[in-house]
Image (cartoon, helix red, strand yellow):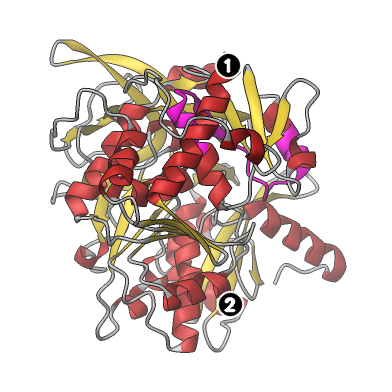
Amino acid sequence: MILKGKRVALPPSPVVHRQFEAHAAATPDAVAVVCAGRQVTYAELDVRANRFAHFLAARGHGRGAKVGVCLDYSIDMLVAILGTLKAGAAYVPFDPAYPAARLQLLLGQVPSLALIVASPATAQMVESAGVETIDLQQLSGRLADLPATRPDATVTGDDICYAVFTSGSTGTPKLTAVRHEGWFNLMNWLKLEYGLHSGSHNLVVSAFGFDLSQRALMTPLFCGATQYLLASRNFDAMMAYRILTEHEIRVVHCASSTLYVLVDWETARGGDALTRLDYVLFGGEPLKVERLADWAKRDGNGCTLLHQYGVAECTDVATSYDLAGYRPGEHDIAPVGKPAHNTDIHLLDEQLRGVAAGEYGEVCIAGAGVGAGYLGGTGPENEKFTTIVADGAPLRLYRTGDRGRVNEAGELVVAGRIDAQVKVRGMRIDPTDVERALGRLAGVREAAVAVVHTGSGDAELIAFVVPAGDAPDENDLRTGLLRTLPRNMVPAGFVRVPGIPLSPHGKVDRATLIEMYRDRYAVSGTTA
């Protein structure tokens, strides 16, 4: 089974920062970035990025080089990113929201890192004997003497623009690289498909290390709009909502769990900042539609919710679905829609043969968005980038490891990870299926399910439940689940929690949930 995205011609040199440069030439006085009360115009940002690009080029860090960026959200961050791209190099985000020990682990995964751009607040976190660390503020005098014009650097669509870390099958971080053509194609699709323009101002709410954040950072500059940045290392719902309220933000990209938090914030305060947005583009984890249903039906809500699917290895977004078309009685799982431009979705069996319409298969992505692969990797994960024969010709694709099917409307439905199933009492279970069933029960506002192991090594499902109103007791939850799930899928324990913790990327933090369970069990000797 194949879903084919619309074919749209790209320019001969589909290079992302050239779009920014075109806006800097056409509308030099337009505001490019706003952060912590400071702002820069397109012309000012272009000049600063050009000078940093010349600095890199003078040191030999041009085409093919990799430049680390470990900065809090700031104007300097975008100077470093754009300057790196202009020099022909690729940037690697080192998220300062991570612990220093984690950043040191990531440093060891980057082959031939040229240097790291940091600040006094982040430099110690990424200090390395083998890699130079520089501070743009300390270099401001030297940079001011460099040319304000863009360097004469050759950059093509095949060149790498950035590389982000993603966990491998063994949990070891892998550095996956994205090419300019794929990144350009993604933003060009967003611009054409959803009419993004110079007024489509954006607020970044996700952590810098997240693959989604790379798209969120650059799309407004690709469209000539203003980029607003949170002056906070970690997601701050109060600050984010205040900026949404006070400024003409039109677009937000975020993980599903981050959207739930923003919706809860708006609902509790009776605000309308979210409902006034043009778009929220979200995804990255299984969708809990019930968390958004009441808010989405509010009178006057003009915000379009785009439920999207993709992976870091393939330019972040492969498909998109307007949630306005979701009907609970017709869909057990909300679709993730149809492919982006120049993107195809192949559903394949274990022998990499296409499955029939309506059947489940592994979701594989082909087309412009397929990345350059894992940098410096030699393990089995590199085999996820493979080649099959399609229509008599070789076709490169990425095997996501996700299980999906195409529904009658021709939309992709992703049912979970092929490898996410766990054996509980000898039976294979996908915890996501249990979460969906819990979310449909009365009195449950949100739920997450994690796998814990008993002292004897047996796996058990533990449900963490955020109640809505009067909290249902454990018996009510069990009875409710048994109406739709087999007995072996009902969790062994239920833990009531005030909220579901999120990782720096805005996704459910299951490791923290498991620690919460262990702490509570050690103290109280009960799971409920």
Q: Pointer 1: what residue?
A: 376
Q: Point out the image quarter for the C terminus.
A: bottom right
Q: Is residue 508 left or right of residue 141?
A: left
Q: Point out the image quarter for the N terminus.
A: top left
Identify the amino acid type marked 2: Asn
Q: Is residue 461 left or right of residue 62?
A: right
Q: Is residue 459 magenta?
A: no
- The residue depicted at 62 percent of the width and 18 percent of the height is 111
- The residue depicted at 39 percent of the width and 47 percent of the height is 43
Element under disc 2? helix
Work out whether 298 lies above or below 388: below
Work out whether 472 lies above or below 344: below
Which of the two marks, 1 or 2, is nearer to us in this view? 1
- The residue depicted at 31 percent of the width and 26 percent of the height is 349
Graded by Cα atoms within 10 Å as few (under 14), some (14 to 19) or many (20 or more), the crowding at tag 2 reads: few
Residue 304, by quadrant, is bottom left
Q: Pointer 2: what residue?
A: 475
State the mark number for residue 410.
none
Asked whether residue 481 is in view, the answer is no
Q: Is residue 96 magenta?
A: yes
Q: Which residues are magenta?
A: 81-104
Q: CA distance from mark 1 to mark 2?
A: 51 Å
Mark 1 and mark 2 residues within 8 Å of each other at the beta carbon? no
Identify the amino acid type marked 1: Gly
Which residue is more in the foreground, 120 or 306? 120
Which residue is more in the foreground, 222 or 468? 222
